[in-house]
């Protein structure tokens, strides 16, 4: 999730999760603050009590907050809510059960067309699948390496091409390691763009060149898979670059465990270090010691620059607050082609709602979150290259029955998430074509047939 301006430390969260998840005693509560003092009360719980931490940060009055509370602090939490006349509902009864359910291993498919839809894949599995796609579809799939990680892993993606001379759509996923549903949504889209026989999907696929990277943060993603039933590991957000902490309540613990990583979505060179980012190495939203200090953002930004003149759209996937956002995050001012992006975005969220009834609010990052979030990838792309359509999907965080899972989606959510996002993209680009007549004419001449296995 794109965190708001609250700066809380990964150090505290990490220590908390070790206790909470081994005891299997954490629950997540939703509270809606009615005044500024309510928000301060929630911040104080997060700051002062080991084990309590935000899943969804405060974003303003009347905006719901999700707070994880261990059993040992439950009575204190309830008393605090009563003292301040705050009501709450249980969103997740047992976080450990979520972790256990989300990591059950489904049967691995040998069919490349059915990859990734019954379980969450490891980085090696994703990359091997991309390589196999390039072999199976040599006329349509090209392996691209956009950058590399601190631990030496490639940031691998695919370029999908169906006709020469098309504008580009760039899709990034997995910039935050724990948001597994973003990675799987990207792989689902790759599969559908290649294999679907639906006429609308074929027209969408063949109207553009597609640059799709399922994992912008490979080191972090590998780390989350190293012990996925341990919350300390599974809920890791940042890169894995080691940094020293400027502030540490337990120096011995810091030296042993932390502080690794920067928030890769606060490390880009547009309003780097601005409001909504952190400057302590243990902060969840630590922006790094400088813009593009992370080799991941530095190298992938160089790749984006190299193809920037081809890009018509840039799409980013996150979880789990169910929003459609666009630049900018450093200010709520309506800049660049705000009105155009808003109108097209309305069509996109309408398309997303058709299949499962999901309803996503839309607006720029700062106004949707209720506070700034500076230094993100989509802001940098928009500011530097003026790409016409730049969006961030905060994907679903609940089952169709309304049960919240937050960052810890069960594998059964992979297909529904992918389907509704694909529906949304079809609607988005149909609407965008109204502003670009040449794009509309090209789409109308696109062949409807899907490519064959070579």
Image (cartoon, rainbow, N blue to C red):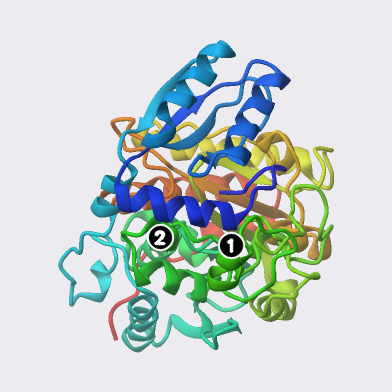
**Residue at horizontal 64 percent and vertical 48 percent from the top:** 432
Labels 2 and 1 touching (C-beta < 8 A): no
- Residue in view at x 63 percent, y 53 percent: 9
Give the side of residue 94 with respect to residue 64, left or right.
left
Residue 411 appearing in the image: no
Residue that badge 1 annotates: 442
- Horizontally, residue 153 falls left or right of residue 18, namely right
Residue 238 lies, in percent from the top left, at 58, 64
Q: What residue sits 37% from the left and 55% below the top?
A: 199
Number of other residues with Cα within 10 Å of mark 2, as a class: few under 14, some 14 to 19, many 20 or more: many
| Depth check, front residue: 95 or 184 | 95
To which residue does mark 2 refer? 234
311 vs 124, nearest the viewer: 124
Residue neighbourhood size for the residue with mark 1, other residues' Cα within 10 Å, grouped as few (<14), some (14–19), many (≥20): some
Where is residue 5 shown, x and y percent of the image? 72, 43
* Mark earlier in primary sequence (2, 1): 2
- Against 413, residue 213 (above or below) is below
- Residue 368, compared with residue 229, is above or below; it is above
Task: Look at the numbered disc 1 and give the secondary structure of its residue.
Answer: helix
**In the drawing, does residue 236 fall left or right of residue 122?**
right
Residue 334, by quadrant, is top right
Depth check: 7 or 177 in front?
7
């Amino acid at each position: 999730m794109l965190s708001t301006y609250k700066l809380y430390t990964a150090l505290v969260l990490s220590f908390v999760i070790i206790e909470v998840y081994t005891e299997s005693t954490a629950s997540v509560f939703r509270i809606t603050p009615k005044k500024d003092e309510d928000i301060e009360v929630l911040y104080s719980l997060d700051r002062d009590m080991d084990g309590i931490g935000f899943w969804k940060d405060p974003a303003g009055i009347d905006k719901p907050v999700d707070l994880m509370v261990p059993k040992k602090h439950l009575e204190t939490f309830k008393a605090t809510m009563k003292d301040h006349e705050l009501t709450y509902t249980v969103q997740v009864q047992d976080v450990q059960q979520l972790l256990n359910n989300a990591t059950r291993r489904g049967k691995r498919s040998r069919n490349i067309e059915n990859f990734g839809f019954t379980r969450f894949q490891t980085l090696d599995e994703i990359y091997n699948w991309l390589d196999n796609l390039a072999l199976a579809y040599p006329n349509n799939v090209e392996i691209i390496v956009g950058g590399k990680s601190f631990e030496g892993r490639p940031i691998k993606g695919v370029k999908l091409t169906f006709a020469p001379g098309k504008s580009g759509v760039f899709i990034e996923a997995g910039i935050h390691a724990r948001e597994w549903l973003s990675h799987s949504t990207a792989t689902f889209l790759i599969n559908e763009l290649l294999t679907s026989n639906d006429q609308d999907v074929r027209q969408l696929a063949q109207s553009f060149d597609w640059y799709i990277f399922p994992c912008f943060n490979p080191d972090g993603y590998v780390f989350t898979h190293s012990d996925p039933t341990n919350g300390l590991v599974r809920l890791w957000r940042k890169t894995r670059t080691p940094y020293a902490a400027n502030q540490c309540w337990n120096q011995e613990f810091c030296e042993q465990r932390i502080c690794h990583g920067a928030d890769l979505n606060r490390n880009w060179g547009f309003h780097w270090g601005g409001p909504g980012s952190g400057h302590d190495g243990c902060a969840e939203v630590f922006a790094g010691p400088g813009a593009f200090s992370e080799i991941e953002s530095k190298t992938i930004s160089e790749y984006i620059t190299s193809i920037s003149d081809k890009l018509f759209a840039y799409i980013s996937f996150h979880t789990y607050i169910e929003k459609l956002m666009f630049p900018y995050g450093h200010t709520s001012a309506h800049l660049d082609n705000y009105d155009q992006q808003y109108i097209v975005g309305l069509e996109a969220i309408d398309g997303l709602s058709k299949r499962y009834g999901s309803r996503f609010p839309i607006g720029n990052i700062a106004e949707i979150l209720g506070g700034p979030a500076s230094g993100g990838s989509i802001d940098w792309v928009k500011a530097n290259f003026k790409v016409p359509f730049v969006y961030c999907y905060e994907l679903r965080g609940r089952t169709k029955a309304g049960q919240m899972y937050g960052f810890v989606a069960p594998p059964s959510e992979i297909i529904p998430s992918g389907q509704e996002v694909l529906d949304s993209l079809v609607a988005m680009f149909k609407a965008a074509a109204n502003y670009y007549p040449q794009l509309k004419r090209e789409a109308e001449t696109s062949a409807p047939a899907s490519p064959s296995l070579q």
